[in-house]
Image (cartoon, helix red, strand yellow):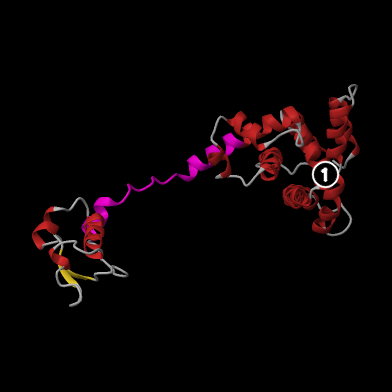
């Protein structure tokens, strides 16, 4: 291949380089091969660089100019904002909650969640590793909403009493359309170590919030509790939180369960 021929046949920098290699690789490939046995042929590409090309073309390196690389590079992938990612995660969790509420954990597959969401499998797996994570994400959202309600009730007013605290928590639970997913979660945590690990963190956060609210109430008026308010709150929080499972189980399986009466009695039985 002559210098003039190389300059004319140039669909792209990469193609030119490979074309030179092919021309020099076989017998009778053209003028550039006429010096076979006398060293590598010197071929000048249109980018203004002379490159020695071995006749056997066994190994060589071509450095492309920056401007040519830029011209052939794919357009950059647009960045996704954190707000968009959060909205998409919430959309996926909503779909998973509907699926779990309809068919339970064991009866729900990732395929059914994907179908429920109307999104692609890639969109789902880009946010969640699988069904376990989605199951815990649904429970986390339910309990996080309850924690937020407790914080809002406590803002700008005297601390909630233990009875008011648990009544607020349970009233939020019964207004939550997917609260019975929590009951499903307890059952799966007994037999699935990974779900148990994830759920433990979720309930630890809720217990921490209840402990803080109880400590505020105990410290608000000295003498309300025996001993240090912080230590008392740490002991009392698991007891107060333990009233929630009884409420959830009964409203799930007992047709004659009186939710309003339960909440009234809770407020009356616990310290005010």
Asked whether 79 falls inside the magenta stretch, the response is yes
Is residue 149 something one can see in this rendering?
no
Image coords of residue 229 (percent x, y): 81, 56
Asked whether 202 falls inside the magenta stretch, the response is no
Closer to us: 212 or 205: 205
Image coords of residue 50 (percent x, y): 15, 69
Residues rendered magenta in the picture: 66-92
Q: Secondary structure at mark 1?
A: helix
Image coords of residue 13 (percent x, y): 22, 56
Q: Disc 1 marks which residue?
A: 241
- Image quadrant in which the N terminus is located: bottom left
Closer to us: 46 or 221: 46
Q: Is residue 257 left or right of residue 205?
A: right
Magenta stretch prevailing secondary structure: helix
Q: Is 23 situated above or below 118?
A: below
The quadrant in which residue 59 appears is bottom left
């Amino acid at each position: 291949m002559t210098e003039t021929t190389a300059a004319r046949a140039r669909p792209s920098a990469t193609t030119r380089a490979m074309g030179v290699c092919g021309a020099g690789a076989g017998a009778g490939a053209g003028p550039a091969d006429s010096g076979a046995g006398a060293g590598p042929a010197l071929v000048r590409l249109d980018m203004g660089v002379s490159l020695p090309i071995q006749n056997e073309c066994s190994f060589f390196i071509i450095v492309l100019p920056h401007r040519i690389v830029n011209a052939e590079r794919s357009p950059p992938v647009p960045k996704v904002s954190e707000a968009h990612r959060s909205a998409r995660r919430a959309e996926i969790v909503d779909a998973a909650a509907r699926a779990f509420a309809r068919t339970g954990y064991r009866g729900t597959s990732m395929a059914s969640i994907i179908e429920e969401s109307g999104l692609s499998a890639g969109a789902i797996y880009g946010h969640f590793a699988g069904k376990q994570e989605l199951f815990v994400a649904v429970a986390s959202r339910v309990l996080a909403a309850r924690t937020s309600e407790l914080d809002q009730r406590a803002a700008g007013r005297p601390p909630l009493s233990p009875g008011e605290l648990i009544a607020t928590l349970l009233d939020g639970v019964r207004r939550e359309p997917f609260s019975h997913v929590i009951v499903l979660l307890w059952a799966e945590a007994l037999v699935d170590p990974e779900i148990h690990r994830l759920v433990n963190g979720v309930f630890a956060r809720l217990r921490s919030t209840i402990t803080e609210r109880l400590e505020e109430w105990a410290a608000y008026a000295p003498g309300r509790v025996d001993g240090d308010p912080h230590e008392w709150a740490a002991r009392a929080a698991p007891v107060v939180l333990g009233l929630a499972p009884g409420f959830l189980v009964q409203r799930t399986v007992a047709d004659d369960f009186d939710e309003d009466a339960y909440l009234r009695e809770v407020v009356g039985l616990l310290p005010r």
